[in-house]
Image (tube, rainbow, N blue to C red):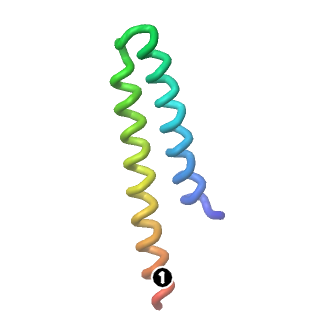
């Protein structure tokens, strides 16, 4: 497993951590919860973005 795959899954770990942080902040009050939810959404987006382009890159190299 190369480093790009490890970093892809690290984004999912960060998304889970931000979701947990957002939920805990939501229970205390709304201050800062939206930022944590936004960062979780961004981490999930980056995961799928990097996965798509890594697959495209691997398919390009395998077709040669």
Q: Please tell me which residue is depicted at 42% across the width and 45% down the height of the picture.
A: 44
Relative to 49, 8 lies left or right: right
Q: Please tell me which residue is depicted at 34% across the width and 23% down the height of the picture.
A: 34
Residue 14 location (% of width, % of height): 52, 37
- Is 35 rendered above or below residue 46? above
- Is 14 rendered above or below residue 7? above
Residue 63 location (% of width, % of height): 46, 89
Q: Please tell me which residue is depicted at 50% across the width and 45% down the height of the picture.
A: 11
- In the displayed orientation, state which residue is furthest to the top: 28
Residue 5 location (% of width, % of height): 57, 59
- Location of residue 41 by image quarter: top left
Quarter that holds the N terminus: bottom right
Q: Nearer the viewer, residue 18 or 53?
A: 18
Q: Nearer the viewer, residue 17 or 6?
A: 17
- In the displayed orientation, state which residue is furthest to the right: 1
Q: Please tell me which residue is depicted at 56% across the width and 50% down the height of the picture.
A: 9
Q: Nearer the viewer, residue 40 or 5?
A: 40
- Is 58 rendered above or below residue 51? below
- Is 56 rendered above or below residue 63? above
What is the secondary structure assignment of the residue under circle 1?
helix
Residue 23 location (% of width, % of height): 46, 22
How crowded is the residue under tag 1: few (<14 C-alpha within 10 Å), some, or many (20+)?
few
Total marks placed: 1
- In the displayed orientation, state which residue is furthest to the bottom: 64
| Residue under label 1 | 61
């Amino acid at each position: 497993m190369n480093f790009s795959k490890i970093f892809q899954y690290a984004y999912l770990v960060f998304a889970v951590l931000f979701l947990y942080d957002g939920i805990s902040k939501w229970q205390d009050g709304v201050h800062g919860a939206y930022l944590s939810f936004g960062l979780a959404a961004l981490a999930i987006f980056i995961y799928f973005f990097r996965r798509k382009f890594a697959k495209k890159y691997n398919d390009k190299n395998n077709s040669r």
